[in-house]
Amino acid sequence: MLAQTTVVSGTVNASDGVPLPGASIIVKGTAIGGVSDFDGNFSLSIPNATATTLVVSYIGYKSKEIALKGLNQNLIIVLTEDANSLDEVVIVGSSVSQSRKKLGNAITTVKSVALVKAAPVNITSSLQGKVPGAQITQNSGDPSGGFSIRLRGPSTIKGSSEPLYVIDGVITSNLTTNVTNLNVSAGDAQPGQNRMVDINPNDIENINILNGAAAAAIYGSRASNGVVVITTKKGGNFEDGPELFYKSTFSVNTLRKKLDLNLQGEQFETVANSALSGRLWPIFGFDPGTGELTTYSNLSTNKFDVTRYDYQDEIFQTGIGTDNYFSMRDGNDTMNYSASVGYLSNEGIIKNTEFNRFSARVNFNHAVTDWLSYGVGLYYANSRSDEKPDGNVFWSPINAMNITNNIYDITQRDSNGNLLAVEPTRVNPLSIIETFDITQNVNHFIPNAHVKITPFENFTIDQIIGIDTYNQKGDIYIPSYPYADVNPAYFDQGFISTAEAKVFNWNYDINATYDFDFNEKLNSNTTAGYSFQASKLEFDATQGRDLDANNIPTVDLQTQPIDTNLDIFGFYLQETVSYDDKLFLTVAGRVDGATNFDKDNRFNFYPKVSGSYVLSREPFWNTEGAVNSARLRLSYGEAGNLTAISPYERFGSYSSNDFLGETTLAQNSRLGNENLKPERTKEFEVGTDLSFFNNRASVLFTFYRQNIEDLIVSRILSPSIGGSTRTENVGTMRNNGIEFYTSITPIKTDHLQWDLNFNFSSNKNKVLSTIGGDITVASVTGATPIVREGEALGVFYGTYYAKDESGNLILSGTSTTGAPEGVPQVERGDLATGVAQRDANGQPTGEVLRKVIGDPNPDYILGIGTDLTYKQFSFSMLWESVQGSDVFDADKRTRQGVGLGSLAQQELSGELPRGYIAGIYPIEEFRIEDGSFVKLREVSISYDLGSILNDSLKNVKVSLIGRNLISIDNFFSYDPETNAGGQSNLLRSVNFGNVPIPSTFSLSLSTNF
């Protein structure tokens, strides 16, 4: 037996001699293999190695097959770069993989080194600016705030446009569950954390992003938003024993931009008694006849002296963060393991906010024989956040500042140390920071088990079972304020609540693949599979207000418990035919069922067809010329979206009632609809991949068209129908777009290399049809998004400026609308026709008109990255530009109305006419701001010290890192990258009390030992 075992060792290098750590070395047709260590070395013990072939691969390089001779040998393997990575094998399903050249659709791969170079605290932020076709938005600068990802634009009205996440074959939830905002009437907003915040980016080997329905059709009814396939790090066979790695990062979070506030030491009188004037907003006048406050008229021009304060100095802080990570990997030719632990602590820029995460991961893989292997994995994360209310409420720290005239010293206290009151009905911002106790605790488990069988040559069966389960608990305590006259809507007598969400998801997938060569040129690859996914959510909460001396609520508030179950099951068949390694055709179909639909509409068929043609494999192609490789690709696929309805939403709701001594059921306001169908995306995609100049440059281009059908909304009904709402399929929507990616290496020598990359994407969204006219949803502080035929999804609809035929503002004069003279006015006219009307003096008259006033959808997104390496020094930088989007900036108006805004200061100084703020206050178009920006997302400079302390520490690297350091924009408030609607798909780009995104400076040290 010993004589039949061959030891094969060696080194895997790039063409320039640089070792390639983490390269995959697999014995073809078996489960035996390993990975190279940090020096590119590997060693394998192979039974019966006569006529055996090694397959060596590395992301971004052409794979190489090496025939072994059955003898112990030491190899030096050189891989050449492949700018288009045509031979790279990518994972496209739970365990389904294909070489990139066979795919007819675009797939973006982001490797570990690119993910973690700028020390991100979560996976989502690590992808910003790096994926063509992806709009990744950080909705809040809170340390545990949520992110939104949209691949190729919005794909639903009522549901989620977030992609499906798959980690090592486990369908993983990125759900946003509100457990710390129960006292907020959020409507369609989805504030809070989403669960990708639990995943440690340092554990990730690579991420494959399947942008469109054609690429993701293998997932059927779950994949219309695209799929993010995450692969974690595995063990390997390392010659020098276990590979130990440690990384420590120290970070400082700071406020990137302060607002220009009104610091002029004056205040307009607003009532007859000037002693009371400082308590009231300067947009109000005083009616001497009635003694009542009035709007827009009788505005006093008298002023009195005041002291003004910059509340930002008391609310914001410099936050400190640390991130420590340790991993260990080892193995031999038949088994390997990888284990890691990490601890992150990150303070926010709002005082008394913090996010902490502990994570641990173990992966173990064992090749029992050359036909049987298995792997098990476990990930655990515990996170805790100390929060303050954030966005969409007037009792958040930033909104409490925005809505309080800054003529009060908010730091003053009484003899007992209690903070003093500010403007009547308002909350002292420091009361929120010092006394609100809001916490969130999460325990998250993701175990998985894989079994791979090769019963005979070229036939494999993969089975995966995975669990994604977590417990999320939130607690809120708002004490009674120690001062009177606070608005009862802000819980003047206190509030308390506790909420808990328990999520248990599991999935089982089995995939069988048979690879068969008809002859030397014609190959068939057949894959069939079955999957089952079950999801369970339990949510329960208690809340109450008006606390007694023992902090027991005297008023209980109703919270509806939730207990839902959803099963998704389906099977698919896929056939790929290859001819001469240059022509590839894939045909696939999937049948899916989901229990949130009626049995008659439960099962749906999702087809896919794609083709790929590698022109550069033709005999006439000169690969030594300027264009080294060229490929054309074409695909069509259909996928579904199940997020728009809850598991039981097709049923009507009923309540029990007593009638004539009997218990009866009465129909509630929501009617049922068992004819609902899943939303369906039909996508056509065409593109090309090119590489030039000895693979020193590459270009990838994609054009796509998506038609989304059977859009689901909760329709408001006529009372005569017998209910107020019903969930219905109501219309269609389209996304047209292009994606462009290019990489260039202008300089490449033994000591110096300079790489540049650009990604550009543009998506044009349009609602094609809606049944029953316009669809509106609950607004966030006056921002009313609308679904209207011919417009992009979620455009802002509201009042607008009155203008003349030349587009100039019509300033108020002698009209009877009550506005002060010489200030902008709201447009008026005929409501039935929407036509503006004028009186004899040319002033607006009639009813207040509304129209589309803004669009949150960007025109295009551009990412520009550069990497420069000179000997031991390396430098990288990433800029992202988002252009053409609008933001509904509610904070802009609020600050002016209370007197602390910069425009209010200009009115005080006479730069703007008296009454200007009163004039623009009801004009919602005034709140529309240009949301375009160019941001320095990442910048880092590193020095590789090599080995120190007698080689006890290897690959020692020191890095200085910055994130979000610069934003080039014209935004009136803190940051155009914001959303008080949270992760909502429809309520987007609303600025209302959100925490701005901080600038982060980090110092990182990493080493192997």
Image (cartoon, helix red, strand yellow):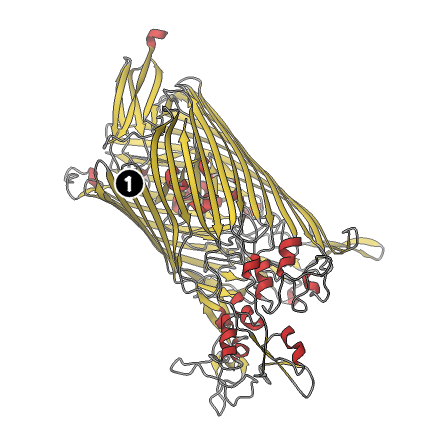
As helix, strand or loop, the secondary structure at mark 1 comes to strand
State the residue lying farthest toward the front: 415
Q: Nearer the viewer, residue 599 or 165?
A: 165
The quarter of the picture where residue 55 lies is: top left
Using residue 58 as the reference point, say whether residue 718 is left or right of it: right
Image vertical order of residue 783 relative to residue 326, above or below: below
Q: Residue at x 22, y 43 (%)?
A: 747
Give residue 667's quadrant in the image.
Answer: bottom right
**Residue appearing at x 45%, y 49% in the figure:** 1000
Looking at the rendered image, the quarter that the N terminus falls into is: top left
Above or below 844: residue 888: above
Going by the numbered disc 1, the residue's amino acid type is Thr
What residue is drawn where x is 58% and y is 49%?
A: 353
Q: Which residue is mark 1?
A: 869
Question: Is 794 situated left or right of 859 in this image?
Answer: right
Q: In the figure, is residue 141 to the left or right of 126?
A: right
Provide residue 817's location: percent of width, then percent of height: 56, 85
